[in-house]
Amino acid sequence: MSRSKAILVSAAIGWAVASAPASALDVKLEVVASGLTHPMAMVSPPGDDRKFIVEQTGTVKILGADGKMIDGDFLNIKHKLPPLKWEFDEEGLLGIAFPPDFKKSGKFYISYTGQLRGDADLGKQLWYAHTNYVTEMRVSKDDPNKADPNYERIVLAIDWPQFNHNGMWIAFGPDGMLYVSTGDGGYANDWGIGHNVTIGNGQDTAVLLGKMLRIDPSKGDPYDVPKDNPFVGKSTHAPEIWALGLRNPWRCSFDMGGSKQLFCGDVGQNSYEEISLVSKGGNYGWRAMEGSYCFDYVNPNNHPKTCNKTGMTDPIIEYKNCSNPDFAAKGDCEGISITGGYVYRGPHKAWDGVYFFGDWSKSFMVAEGVLFAARKQGDNWVKETINVTNIPGFNDFIMAFGQDNQGNVYVMGTRIRGPNGEQDKIYKIVP
């Protein structure tokens, strides 16, 4: 969620269209949950109609199968988080994932930014912001709506240079493996403390930052690397890497239908926002590329006409970012920070295969979020804006999206930049 780049100077624009799309998709938004603080994700476990809602501040709440919030927290890890900045922050509790055997094992996984590990080396102790964790948790034996507060197993720990560009979306794929998205380490331009000076972390195959990782936490200590990961056995690559070249993947999802493709929104720097289909061994360009354009980390607003794009995959959708002064002046920009969504597989058949996503906002200072829909037409994805017919002028900051086991898609919105307030809502997208 590289919203901070709007302070540093940011990014944004959708797929192969140079201006805002002329068409719009009419939808309604139905409130299904309220009184929340910065919801980061909403996930239903396999075969379970409860919806688990992740709040950035460190709690997980449950929306019951009856559509009512269950009293109290399912999980509370506020004590494990660094103090969150009230005005704006990208740290916190960021993700939750349920394995295929959740009903039997009761185990689940969370991702969060914790205090920097005490055993990190001296240089990191002096300069690094925090450690990003993926940990294994389990449900209480006494109450299925409560997590066991006395159990946690650390699966993955990555020391993080800056407070931003964490990524840390997690989910089990259709293959039963755990996928973990990681940002490039923060700040801007994939440069600075904790970044590869020559090529940036996104292209550095020896580090786990700026990547999509794939591991098996059900085996090994603390996990196994699947033997069919693309870079297993290569001394130049970390074996956990499934794909590389990501800047700040905010948020990703597997399509419930079709060929179960992995969609990922990757927040850009100052000029282009993108959605990519992430596949085995793919390289999505950062920091050599921003979207489908060549990138110069020293002059981020000016894109070289030529560069070495060998082996790099262009996004399926990209659009212009209002942080680029030229785009803002022309009025053809559409946001500053993309928010990846989900492919609709619900009961409204006219929407089957439509990918719903959004942009956090066109402005950092006030809420000007934008909702989008994209359909595949031939070999291309065509983007539309969304018109919310029952809430005229809807423009919340778009935090994240969710999906239930019936294939319906939900959007999480807030009116406040920082993680505070208990006034945020989750909406179901309906015709």
Image (spheres, helix red, strand yellow):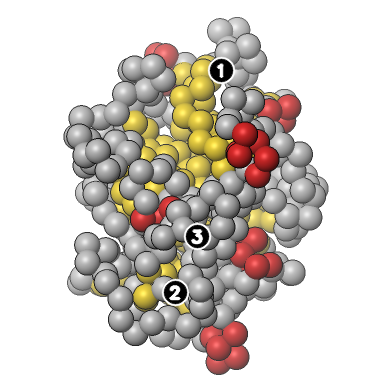
Helix, strand or loop at label 1? It is: loop
Write down the residue under mark 2. 296
Q: Is residue 26 left or right of residue 280?
A: right
**Residue 11 image position (x, y, % from top left):** 54, 71
Tell how many labels: 3
| Nearer-N-terminus badge (1/2) | 1
**Residue 27 image position (x, y, % from top left):** 51, 65
Q: Amino acid at mark 2?
A: Asp
Residue 188: quarter of image: bottom right
Q: Amino acid at mark 1?
A: Glu
| Nearer-N-terminus badge (2/3) | 3
Pick the front one: 57 or 104: 57
Helix, strand or loop at label 2? It is: loop
Pick the front one: 19 or 305: 305
Q: Kindly indicate whether the residue at mark 1 contacts the one at mark 3 (C-beta within 8 angstroms).
A: no
Structural crowding at the residue carrying mark 1, measured as other residues with C-alpha within 10 Å and reported as few (<14), some (14–19) or many (≥20)? few
**Residue 116 image position (x, y, % from top left):** 64, 33
Q: Kindly indicate whether the residue at mark 2 contacts the one at mark 1 (C-beta within 8 angstroms).
A: no
Decide: is 102 above or below 279. Answer: above
